[in-house]
Image: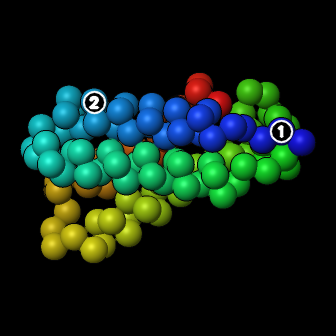
Amino acid sequence: MTVFPLWHVALTALVAALASLVLLRWRFPEISARDAILTSIVVGVSVLGWRLAGNVGPLNEDPIPPVIPNDVLAPMATYVLLSVYAGFRYRTPSARWPLVVAWLAVISFVANVVVI
C-alpha cells in the first residue's frame, strides 16, 4: 500500500495552482488578475483536498502505469469545486468559463500524473 507524504501532495497542488495561473493569464486575458489568482487557489485546494482525502493504498496503486486512480479522480474534484466556486459568485469571471474549467481540469490531471 503506497501513500504519499504531505510535502509531495502539497507540491502537486502548488504545481497545479501555478500552472493554472499561468494558463489563465496567458489564454484568458479577460479574467482579472484577482479572479485568476482566486481560481488558481481553488484548483490548488481541490488537488490538495482530494489527494489528502484519497491518500490510501488502493487509490495509489498503478493498474495502468503510470496513471493511478487518484490521478483520474483529482480532476473531477477540480471540476466540481470550480463549479461550486462559480455558483457562489455573482457572475463568472469569463463568458468562456466552461472552457476555463475544462482546461483547468486538464491541468489538474497532468499535474497529478507528472508530479505524483
- The dot on residue 48 is none
Disc 1 versus disc 2: distance between alpha carbons?
A: 31 Å
Q: Is residue 68 above or below residue 66?
A: below
Mark 2 residue crowding within 10 angstroms, few (<14) / some (14–19) / many (20+)? some
What residue is rendered at 38% in x and 59% in y?
A: 82
Instruction: Tell me where residue 14 appears, x and y as whole percent.
Output: 44, 36
What residue is rendered at 52% in x and 48% in y?
A: 47
In the image, is 41 to the left or to the right of 75? left
Instruction: Tell me where residue 35 appears, x and y as whole percent.
Output: 18, 51
Q: Is residue 10 visible?
A: yes
Q: Which residue is mark 1?
A: 2
Mark 1 residue crowding within 10 angstroms, few (<14) / some (14–19) / many (20+)? few
In the image, is 110 to the left or to the right of 37? right
Q: Which residue is mark 2?
A: 22
**Residue 103 position by quadrant:** top left
Instruction: Tell me where residue 92 appears, x and y as whole percent.
Output: 20, 63
Q: Say what secondary structure mark 1 lies in.
A: loop
Disc 2 marks a residue whose amino acid type is: Val
Q: Is residue 61 visible?
A: no
What residue is rendered at 38% in x and 39% in y?
A: 17
What residue is rendered at 32% in x and 45% in y?
A: 40
Disc 1 marks a residue whose amino acid type is: Thr
Instruction: Give the label, 1 or 2, closer to the camera.
Output: 1
In the image, is 26 to the left or to the right of 75? left
